[in-house]
Amino acid sequence: MVTPPDSIRVLFVTIPPTQAEAFVQALVEARVVACGNILPGRSIYRWQGALCREDEAVVLLETTADALEAAMAHIAAAHPYDCPKIIALEPLAVAAAYAAWVHAELGGRSQTA
Protein backbone atom coordinates (compact mmCIF):
# COMPACT_ATOMS: atom_id res chain seq x y z
CA MET A 1 0.00 0.00 0.00
CA VAL A 2 1.17 3.51 -0.79
CA THR A 3 0.64 6.47 1.51
CA PRO A 4 0.05 10.03 0.29
CA PRO A 5 3.57 11.26 -0.42
CA ASP A 6 2.90 14.75 0.92
CA SER A 7 3.76 13.60 4.43
CA ILE A 8 7.37 12.57 3.66
CA ARG A 9 10.32 14.61 2.43
CA VAL A 10 13.75 13.52 1.25
CA LEU A 11 16.65 15.88 1.80
CA PHE A 12 19.66 15.76 -0.52
CA VAL A 13 22.87 17.06 1.06
CA THR A 14 26.58 16.81 0.23
CA ILE A 15 29.27 16.91 2.90
CA PRO A 16 32.94 15.96 3.29
CA PRO A 17 33.12 12.15 3.54
CA THR A 18 35.05 12.22 6.82
CA GLN A 19 32.20 14.13 8.49
CA ALA A 20 29.20 12.35 7.00
CA GLU A 21 28.56 9.64 9.59
CA ALA A 22 28.72 11.95 12.62
CA PHE A 23 26.61 14.51 10.75
CA VAL A 24 23.84 12.00 9.99
CA GLN A 25 23.98 10.49 13.46
CA ALA A 26 23.48 13.92 15.06
CA LEU A 27 20.41 14.56 12.88
CA VAL A 28 18.90 11.16 13.74
CA GLU A 29 19.62 11.67 17.45
CA ALA A 30 17.95 15.10 17.30
CA ARG A 31 14.89 13.38 15.79
CA VAL A 32 14.69 15.76 12.84
CA VAL A 33 15.33 12.92 10.38
CA ALA A 34 14.43 9.25 10.69
CA CYS A 35 17.21 7.88 8.53
CA GLY A 36 20.22 8.92 6.53
CA ASN A 37 21.92 7.09 3.68
CA ILE A 38 25.56 7.95 2.95
CA LEU A 39 26.82 7.38 -0.58
CA PRO A 40 30.24 8.09 -2.08
CA GLY A 41 30.32 10.94 -4.56
CA ARG A 42 32.46 13.33 -6.53
CA SER A 43 31.41 16.90 -7.17
CA ILE A 44 32.64 19.25 -9.88
CA TYR A 45 31.59 22.86 -9.42
CA ARG A 46 32.73 26.44 -9.69
CA TRP A 47 33.42 28.25 -6.39
CA GLN A 48 34.67 31.82 -6.13
CA GLY A 49 35.80 31.76 -9.76
CA ALA A 50 37.73 28.49 -9.57
CA LEU A 51 36.79 25.09 -10.94
CA CYS A 52 36.74 22.61 -8.05
CA ARG A 53 36.71 18.82 -7.92
CA GLU A 54 36.03 17.25 -4.54
CA ASP A 55 35.24 13.86 -3.09
CA GLU A 56 32.01 14.33 -1.16
CA ALA A 57 29.50 12.13 0.57
CA VAL A 58 26.01 12.31 -0.89
CA VAL A 59 23.54 12.09 1.97
CA LEU A 60 19.85 11.26 1.53
CA LEU A 61 17.77 12.01 4.62
CA GLU A 62 14.14 11.06 5.25
CA THR A 63 11.92 13.32 7.34
CA THR A 64 8.30 14.43 7.53
CA ALA A 65 6.77 17.54 6.01
CA ASP A 66 6.16 18.83 9.55
CA ALA A 67 9.81 18.32 10.56
CA LEU A 68 11.28 19.68 7.33
CA GLU A 69 11.95 23.22 8.57
CA ALA A 70 13.62 21.95 11.76
CA ALA A 71 15.68 19.44 9.78
CA MET A 72 16.88 22.11 7.35
CA ALA A 73 17.79 24.43 10.24
CA HIS A 74 19.78 21.66 11.97
CA ILE A 75 21.56 20.80 8.72
CA ALA A 76 22.47 24.43 8.02
CA ALA A 77 23.74 24.98 11.57
CA ALA A 78 25.87 21.81 11.65
CA HIS A 79 27.18 21.89 8.07
CA PRO A 80 30.84 22.85 7.56
CA TYR A 81 30.32 24.60 4.18
CA ASP A 82 29.66 28.33 3.73
CA CYS A 83 26.97 27.49 1.16
CA PRO A 84 25.74 23.94 1.81
CA LYS A 85 23.63 22.08 -0.71
CA ILE A 86 20.33 21.37 1.05
CA ILE A 87 17.61 20.33 -1.36
CA ALA A 88 14.21 19.02 -0.23
CA LEU A 89 12.39 16.64 -2.54
CA GLU A 90 8.79 15.48 -2.42
CA PRO A 91 8.47 11.81 -3.43
CA LEU A 92 5.89 10.61 -5.94
CA ALA A 93 4.92 7.71 -3.68
CA VAL A 94 5.98 6.23 -0.35
CA ALA A 95 5.32 2.73 0.99
CA ALA A 96 2.77 3.09 3.79
CA ALA A 97 4.78 1.00 6.26
CA TYR A 98 7.90 3.08 5.64
CA ALA A 99 6.02 6.37 6.02
CA ALA A 100 4.53 5.12 9.29
CA TRP A 101 8.00 4.21 10.54
CA VAL A 102 9.40 7.66 9.63
CA HIS A 103 6.54 9.34 11.52
CA ALA A 104 6.99 7.05 14.52
CA GLU A 105 10.73 7.78 14.68
CA LEU A 106 10.09 11.51 14.62
CA GLY A 107 7.66 11.34 17.51
CA GLY A 108 4.45 10.90 15.54
CA ARG A 109 4.36 14.40 14.05
CA SER A 110 1.01 14.74 12.26
CA GLN A 111 0.72 11.64 10.15
CA THR A 112 -1.43 11.65 7.01
CA ALA A 113 -1.06 7.94 6.30
Image (cartoon, grey):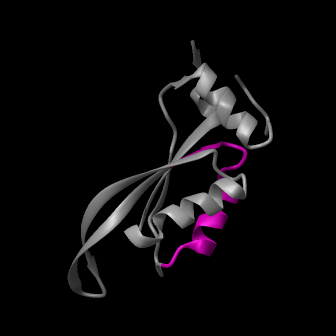
Q: Is residue 11 above or below residue 77?
A: above
Q: Is residue 93 above or below residue 36?
A: above
Name the quadrant of the C terminus.
Answer: top right
Q: Residue at x 64, y 50 (%)?
A: 33
Name the quadrant of the N terminus.
Answer: top right
Asked whether, in this view, residue 29 is left or right of residue 82, the answer is: right
Question: Can residue 78 be found in the magenta stretch?
Answer: yes
Find residue 72 and report its image quarter.
Answer: bottom right
The residue nearer to you, when weighing 102 against 69, is 102
Q: Position of residue 12 (x, y in %)?
A: 45, 53
Provide the residue span drawn in magenta.
61-80
- Work out whether residue 4 can be spotted: no
Question: Can residue 94 be found in the magenta stretch?
Answer: no
Q: Position of residue 13 (x, y in %)?
A: 45, 59
- Work out whether residue 79 can be spotted: yes
Asked whether, in this view, residue 102 is left or right of residue 95, the answer is: right
Asked whether, in this view, residue 27 is left or right of residue 46, the answer is: right
Q: Is residue 96 above or below residue 85?
A: above
Q: Residue at x 61, y 36 (%)?
A: 8
Q: Position of residue 24 (x, y in %)?
A: 55, 59
Q: Residue at x 65, y 53 (%)?
A: 28
Q: Residue furthest top?
A: 1
Q: Position of residue 45 (x, y in %)?
A: 25, 72
